[in-house]
Amino acid sequence: MKVKSQDTEGVTSLWLDTSARETSVALIHDDQILTHIISETNALDSLFNGLKTCLRSEGLAFEDVDDIHYCEGPGSSLGLRISAMALKTWKTLRPKIPLYACRSLPLHAILLAEDVETPDSFSLVGQWKKGNWFHLKHKKNFVVTAGEMNTLTDEEVLELKGPVYHIKQRKFSTHPPTHFLPVSTNLNGLPKALATPGLFREVDQPELFNLGKPTFKKWTPGRHR
């Protein structure tokens, strides 16, 4: 079994995301993914069993983790609440461990863009509630930040031009249009995402994306092209 040396240089980060149908848990050391788990089983089991498996595979203990990066949403309400519960528990056990939060659409846009088969320009959407969608437009060499999302109605989301990808959810209020392309979680671009300026922000306590009804901003081709 490998054991982390006390004088090992670099930072070991824990990553977790329960916002989509696929829960992802990973350990990253500097710019390298040490190990990861992606699972479609229920978020509660996926999160805790995934963490246990990742730590065990690297011969590490939770005390060896230097910081935690996580997705605060938007996404699966139950999954996000389970994540918040775990983070609050871990923060209680280790009050000084840093927490860094990001939003799901900017994060998945970066991960999706790392796939060589992904077009240079695309739209990424995530269903919130019936009739409500979050939307992000991604372009090659465009720096994605935490706030790059707007909101669309069912009618407006059908007006999107070009490839449209959607983040898979455990439950849909309405099924996505058939021409939308589902996004499968691929963590190859995760080290790059963790290092992207403006994507993550440090928080004292775990926070969830505002669960209230989003305020809609009128989508127009000229504003969001």
Image (tube, grey):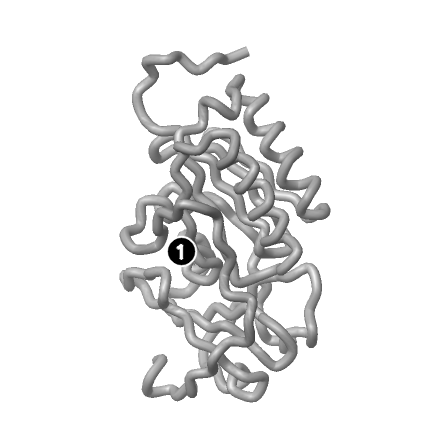
Where is residue 42 shown, x and y percent of the image? 72, 47
Name which residue lies at 56% across and 48% down: 84
User: Which three-letter amino acid code belongs to the residue tagged 1?
Assistant: Ile
Determine the image quadrant of residue 143: bottom left
Name which residue lies at 62% across and 74% down: 129
Left or right of residue 94: residue 169: right
Name which residue lies at 33% across and 61% down: 144
Name which residue lies at 39% across and 32% down: 96
Q: Is residue 51 above or below residue 144?
A: above
- Of 114 and 47, nearer the camera is 47
Q: Is residue 213 visible?
A: yes
Where is residue 2 shown, x and y percent of the image? 50, 13
The residue pinned by badge 1 equals 110
Left or right of residue 215: residue 19: right
Q: Is residue 116 visible?
A: no
The crowding category of the residue bearing disc 1, from other C-alpha atoms within 10 Å (few below 14, some 14 to 19, many at least 20), is many
Q: Quadrant of the N terminus?
A: top right
Where is residue 82 shown, x and y percent of the image? 63, 48
Q: Quadrant of the C terminus?
A: bottom left
Where is residue 10 shown, x and y percent of the image? 31, 26
- Of 100 and 145, nearer the camera is 100
Q: Is residue 103 above or below residue 180?
A: above
Count of numbered badges drawn on the protein: 1
- Of 202 and 42, nearer the camera is 202
Q: Name the secondary structure under disc 1.
A: helix
